[in-house]
Amino acid sequence: MTDHNAIAADTLELLLMNQQALRASIEELSLWVRQRGSIPTADNVMVALRTLDTHAEAIATGIEALRS
């Protein structure tokens, strides 16, 4: 692995960890909203979070490719 690839992989990994932390906090807020009766809003949030999950998988694959 070149130094540039290592730097890129490390940076992407940090961004991925930030994305995962934001996802978790947004999910907690969505659950709170759902408990207060705004089910359509909570459902919309969960749909958006699935997009984050899909992108997280692609980012993880890219990081793996950079590290190999």
Image (cartoon, rainbow, N blue to C red):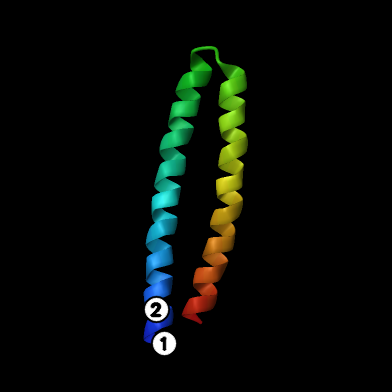
Q: Is the N terminus in the top left, top right, bottom left or bottom right quadrant? A: bottom left
Residue at horizontal 58 percent and vertical 34 percent from the top? 46
Amino acid at dot 2: Ala
Across and down, in percent, residue 36 comes to 49, 13
**For mark 1, what is the residue?**
2
Residue 41, by quadrant, is top right
Is the residue marked by circle 1 packed among few (<14), some (14-19), or many (20+) residues within 10 Å?
few
Residue at horizontal 60 percent and vertical 43 percent from the top? 50
The alpha-carbon separation of the residues under discs 1 and 2 comes to 6 Å
**For mark 2, what is the residue?**
6
Is the residue marked by circle 2 packed among few (<14), some (14-19), or many (20+) residues within 10 Å?
some
Residue at horizontal 44 percent and vertical 40 percent from the top? 24
Amino acid at dot 1: Thr
Horizontal side of 12 relative to 38 (left or right) equals left
Label 2 secondary element: helix
Horizontal side of 43 relative to 23 (left or right) equals right
Across and down, in percent, residue 32 comes to 45, 21
Residue at horizontal 37 percent and vertical 60 percent from the top? 14
As displayed, is residue 9 above or below residue 43?
A: below
Q: Please give the label number shown on residue 53.
A: none
Label 1 secondary element: loop
As displayed, is residue 12 above or below residue 32?
A: below
Residue 5, by quadrant, is bottom left
Residue 49, by quadrant, is top right
- Marks 1 & 2, CB-CB < 8 Å contact: yes
